[in-house]
Amino acid sequence: MNMKALSITRRTFVKAAGALAAVLAISSQAGSGLLKPTKRAVADSSGSPEILLTSCHDTGPFIAHVKDGRWFKSSPLEPNLPIGHNGMAVRNRVYSADRIRYPMKRADFDVNNRNTQNRGKLNFVRISWDEAITLVANEIQRVKDTYGPSAFYTSMGGHTWRGSMGNGHGWKSRFFSLLGGFTNRVGGTSTVGWKDGAPLIWGGSFIGNNNYTDILQNGKIVVYWSTDPATHNYGGGNMESNRIRLQLKAKGIKIYVIDTWLTDTAGLFADKFIHVIPGTDEAMMAAIAYTWIKDGSVNTQYLATHTVGYDQFEAYVLGTSDGVPKTPEWAEAICGVDRRTIVAFAREWASNPLYIVATPGGANRRANSAEWVRMLITLQAMLGYIGKPGAGVGEEDHYGSLTYGGVSTPAALKQPGGVPGVANNVNQSILHVYFPKAVLDPPINWTTQVTPYTYPQAGYQEIHLIGGTGGTLLNQIPGINGYVNALQSPKIEFIFSMHAWWESSPSFSDVVLPVCHTGERDDIMAWRNYVVYMHKIIDPLYESKNDFDVFVMLADKLGIRAAFDQGKDWDAWMRDFYSKTGLSMSYDDFKAAGFYKFNFEAPTPQVTLKKFADDPDNNKLATPSGKIEIFSQRVKDFYGDDPEAPAIPKYIVPFEGRYSPAAQKYPLDFMSPHSKFARHSQWQNMGWQRDEPQVRMGAYMPLFMNPADAEARGIKNGDVVKVYNDRGAIKCGAKVTERVPAGVVWTYEGGYYKPAQPGVVGSIDNGGDANVITIPRPCGKIEDGMCAHTCSVEVQKWSG
């Protein structure tokens, strides 16, 4: 494994002897030699030095510039790195006005009079760290003594700040596991269809990848199906994939985009954009299969050697099993795609290697998402394209790790690998979308693929204490008004949260503990072919503390400190963790250098399931048959003839949307995709940093809608509108555009939950949080994940 250590991590610019001088403090390793400054800088009139420190965000590594203890800007770690927008802007949140500055307690909370009905009303008072830790520790001990550890629930949010050691979720799990365990949160979010559909057909939840090196050499067509990486990679990935799309076009490889509106990916790169009505992709796919069968394009040899159950799928497509042939005319009436377009696309697909990009988000988050994944895999199997160069279906290679060879991220660095785990001895979980019912009306029951679950499990207690780190629960999971009801229930006797900003989850807590921004602690993180030392850029502001230090204080109070921290401080944990990465540079040299850079070798094509395609008998899949199971006997045995859980992939009418009874009252299809510059709710507390359409809407989240729908409701561009259904209502600013087809409206997911009346269930949300109105249920019977893109609403001009 070739490595190169570059050390451009700290430059101190000083004024000396009346002359201007620039001194670059550097170190070298692996023969890299000394690096000379590429530009000079002058200390200001005060003579204050400028300190440069390496750090990293999930969008890429950067250099933090610090002067007089203030982090005032960031710059790329190296020139031309394709890092995302947020890697440069991450510093801004450290100085946000809504930082949680001190330990806080809800003013009307008392252990003898908890007033849980007042959670969310923002009535907090400042307390000392000692008082806060004592109160939290006493409540943890009381709940454990009264109910046992299954009464602990530890999932207040999903994504947390990046880094390996500083990951608050990891320390939280270690802490509660040492107390005996905890009830966990389960359920898919971004990859629901892949997580629960793919194992049933090809034996694993992995999202396949042919890297772009293979596609550039062997591909003819790339289809971005219900995914918009040109938008998402600004805030959640890096920009290299957009550069690669330009290479695809230069090579003459066609780019198709199939989606529910004209996305940035479609507008910037597509040779052809195909609009499909939300939730109806599988109808179009069935008609494509029908065309291939009638044309004689099916690879019968591949199907015979690599799959099982194709005959049942063909019977469905031809209509011999249900009397409904899935013709292009049939599909057009459902999905809105012209039958001639379906036929032409099907024939072009059958004539050329075609790779489908079907990444997290998109159709993964809508009704029957498992059918979307199973059908895509089935179609590629019908042509023998699974495991073949230039073809297949899977995730975009947007981190570059598969575009090039010679890159291997140490296993210890895979998130949240830095925190040593402890076994959780509580075998009980709550499906996230059923959390309100789990609290207010248990038991709850659900299935994941073909496995049933229930809460509470026999022998365990219901939850009574919630302790959370990072993320913000009420911005990430559908059905917020139900969550408010549950969080205000007296059954939840105590809630504490460890967070850096006054987002929704802290406001529903009894005690709030302020923790560090990622720039206020040391850490280590891997990104593509870099391993970066994340320096503590500034001292922690106010009274915030590292998550680790908070749990050490709690562990000390509860008598488990020796087991929790093993007698090691933060630096010792960092050194111990680094020793497990297998990197040859010493820890001290790595810290001084700032990062490892693994050399990219010559790009080599990589094809998912190539060995299976070449020799299926000796490279079996992890399905019962060892083959691609177009017909799943496991599904048949578990669900029988349930039309909502078919043994073969089918088009199923979504439970909400224009073809459902809900459309009579709420005729518009509503969706909530990722925004361009945010990562879920992150950045919503930075007004100038919000997405450009939101800035234009007077800080309201934009609601994108078609001119015809707007005109029919007397709405003009820029109007404040109410978006609502029986589950709740949000305010948005109308963004009227023809990029959105009639009958469809959408706003970005991640808007801050800001009810007009804090703590009041059903109060209209001024923050435009989509999950106030999305449906709190799984995507289907096979899937356990959240359903964000299947939702019926109405829109009216706000008159309040």
Image (spheres, helix red, strand yellow):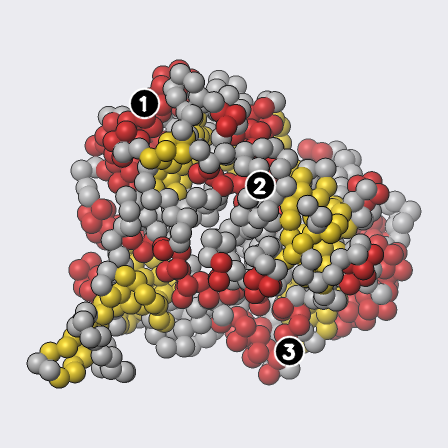
Q: Nearer the viewer, mark 3 or mark 1?
A: 1
**Closer to the camera in the image, 426 or 83:** 83
Estimate how packed mark 1 is, as few (under 14), some (14 to 19) or many (20 or more) residues with alpha carbons within 10 Å: some
Q: Is residue 355 left or right of residue 16?
A: right
Residue wearing tag 3 = 253
Identity of the residue drawn at 43% across and 68% down: 83
Residue at 50% in and 54% down: 684
Residue bearing mark 1? 138
Q: Among all residues in the image, which is located at the extreme front?
A: 800
From the viewer's perspective, is residue 789 above or below residue 266? above
The picture quadrant where one finds residue 300 is bottom right
| Disc nearer the start of the sequence (3/2) | 3
Q: Position of residue 42 (x, y in %)?
A: 22, 79
Q: Secondary structure at mark 1?
A: helix
Quarter of the rendering containing residue 297: bottom right
Looking at the image, can residue 458 be seen? yes
In the foreground, 718 or 555: 718
Q: Identify the image quadrant of the C terminus.
A: top right
The residue at which mark 2 appears reads as 755
Disc 2 marks a residue whose amino acid type is Pro
Residue shown at the point (61%, 71%) measured from the top left: 390
Q: Three-letter amino acid code at disc 1?
A: Asn
Q: Nearer the viewer, mark 3 or mark 2?
A: 2
How many discs mark residues in the rendered view? 3
Question: Which residue type does callout 3 highlight?
Answer: Ile
Q: Is residue 582 above or below residue 218?
A: above
Could you give the CA–CA distance between mark 3 and mark 2, rounded to whole angstroms? 48 Å
Instruction: Classify mark 2: helix, strand or loop.
Output: loop
Helix, strand or loop under label 3: loop
Q: Of marks 1 and 2, which one's residue comes earlier in the chain?
A: 1
